[in-house]
Image (cartoon, grey):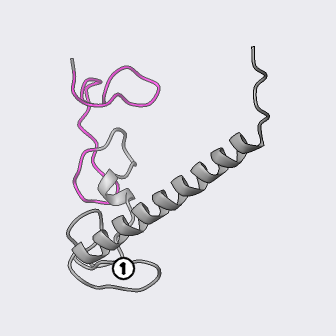
Amino acid sequence: MCPRLALPDTDLCAVCLGGEQPTCADGCGRGVVAPGMLSLACVEPTVTVDVGDCPGLHGKGCGRALQTAGLCGRCKIEAERAKADADAEWERARDAAIAAAQAAEPEPAPF
């Protein structure tokens, strides 16, 4: 069982067909499935934001160091609070809609 990916329209990889492992057409040296292809590292767009900069919330830039989920600690806590507030508001609206629907239903007839 060969660990390499098969060439398009075949059941074998380039090495199993008697050739060499093709490398990235961009010149990075990484292996690819077929000649002329780019490696995943060369295909992915480059990051335009510094790795350590928090983008902030609600259009306000932050610039602090990232800690988790692409945010700094303060922005992460603020995002979690905003989500909890939105969830609570949704639950209040849902409960009010259920209560209004139940109040509008006629009383069942006694047996």
The three-letter code of the residue at mark 1 reads: Gly
Location of the C terminus (image quadrant)? top right
Q: Which residues are magenta?
A: 2-31
What residue lies at 47% left-to-right and 57% top-to-bottom?
87
Q: Nearer the viewer, residue 81 or 41?
A: 81
What residue lies at 23% left-to-right and 64% top-to-bottom?
68
- Across and down, in percent, residue 34 comes to 37, 39
Q: Nearer the viewer, residue 107 or 63?
A: 107
Q: Quadrant of residue 54?
A: bottom left
Q: Regarding mark 1 in the picture, which secondary structure is present there?
A: loop
Location of the N terminus (image quadrant)? top left
Q: Is residue 57 left or right of residue 41?
A: right
What residue lies at 30% left-to-right and 69% top-to-bottom?
76
Q: Nearer the viewer, residue 22 or 54?
A: 54
33 versus 3 height, above or below: below
| Main SS category, magenta section | loop
Residue under numbered circle 1: 56
Q: Quadrant of residue 31?
A: top left
